[in-house]
Image: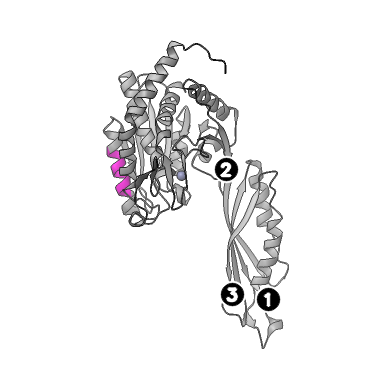
Amino acid sequence: MERTKTSPDDVVWRERLQYCEARQPALVKTIRQFVEIESPSDDKPAADRMSAFLAGAFEALGGRARVHPAQEAGNNLQVDFPGREKIKPVLLLGHFDTVYSLGTLATMPCHEADGRLCGPGVLDMKSGIGLMLYAIEALQAWHSGLPRPVTVFLVSDEEIGSRSSRRITETLAKQSAAVLVLEPAAGTRGAVKTARKGVGEYKLTVTGVASHAGLDPGKGHSAIIELARQMLTISKLNNVQSGVSVNPGVIRGGTRTNVVAAEAVAEIDVRIAHARQATVVDRKLRSLKPVDKRCKLSMTGGINRLPMERTAGVAALYKKAQTLAKRIDWHLDEAAVGGGSDGNFTAGIGIPTLDGMGGVGDGAHAVHEHIVISELPRRMLLLAGMIEAI
Ligand SMILES: [Zn+2]
């Protein structure tokens, strides 16, 4: 392999990496603290405890915390850091809610094993919040203060659709130069995410006519049979090539085997690769007609998150990240993924967004959720470098 001569810049970056490596034990300890404060999306008191704890952690670095109270979800947390240059801030976006119910720690305790830190929400995405904290601290140490303003926004309800936080996320993104999302990296190689599919949730309710299955079978109009017919039609909307997928993941209906079912329901997950597909799929789902004319169909729901598309702004951010990574001989990959995040909102309104800047690991939302500890220093360096470079 051909090697270029080490420029002074590269020396600086190596020293910075050493700084990040030296901070690794403290960062792990902090992430552990975050994991050990359980914060399920649907438990306001628990989520509020996490929000308050995080406010304290970021205020200790000189940030100005602003709590956005939410009625049902936990309070969303904004922290503003002033910078030396009077330019637009970079928005660091993340969420502190998890999919794990209160008490999960009892069976899934946070622990270190084989170079991994395991525990509920450690990958998705409490390690990402830890990285924000330590990247800001590093920049302050390297520059005796932040070189540019930074806004941190930590959402309480990302795992359940971001209803209480979406408007704030979009407002803050509009005021920012770019958005870095600290969701987990893609795969074990730690790729950043430059495209995400859009996500929709729909519910189809079929109302039929009940009757006695034995005495009056002809009088009934089965909602279950009708739902089954509709499912076949809906499944034809799947198109792997164009990136559209439609999954009726839950169905229920009927009351007893000897009753022709009066009602049946399907809950449908929809994914799209391009914004223009949203209206097409939505129209098709809403215009379904019953095959049995005595049955009624009602479709509710919609596309919740538009796709994060790989726009020129997104590609430019990735290029910057790649250049930075190269300084420490790191080949940083990019990935397009099917899952949505709040990055979909910010990219959807045209603000350059780079996602998957957080921890590297596996098992998000599962019992084996973990991060790889040795990946933390360079992720911290990358984040700090991006805040500087944007
Ligand atoms: Zn997440």
The CA span between labels 1 and 3 is 12 Å
Find residue 83 and report its horizontal and vertical position in percent.
35, 23
Q: Is residue 115 left or right of residue 344?
A: left
> Is disc 1's CB within 8 Å of ligand 1?
no
Nearest the camera: 123 or 41? 123
- Going from the N terminus, do you reach mark 2 or mark 1 first? 1
- Tell me the amino acid under the disc marked 3: Gly
Could you tell me which secondary element the residue under label 1 belongs to?
loop
Mark 3 surroundings within 10 Å by alpha-carbon count, few (fewer than 14), some (14 through 19), many (20 or more)? some
Q: The disc labelled 2 sits on which kind of residue?
A: Leu
Quadrant in the rendering for residue 195: top right
Which image quarter: residue 227?
Answer: bottom right
Where is mark 2, residue-wise?
Answer: 306
- The secondary element bearing badge 3 is classed as loop
In the rendered image, which quarter contains the N terminus?
top right
- Which residue occupies 71% across, 62% down? 289
Please name which of the two marks, 1 or 3, marks the residue nearer to the observer. 3
The residue carrying mark 1 is 221
Q: Nearer the N terminus, badge 3 or badge 2?
A: 3
> In which quadrant of the rendered view does residue 21 lie?
top left
Instruction: Read off the magenta span.
Output: 48-56
Residue 366, visible in the rendered structure: yes
Left or right: 235 in relation to 140: right
Label at residue 372: none
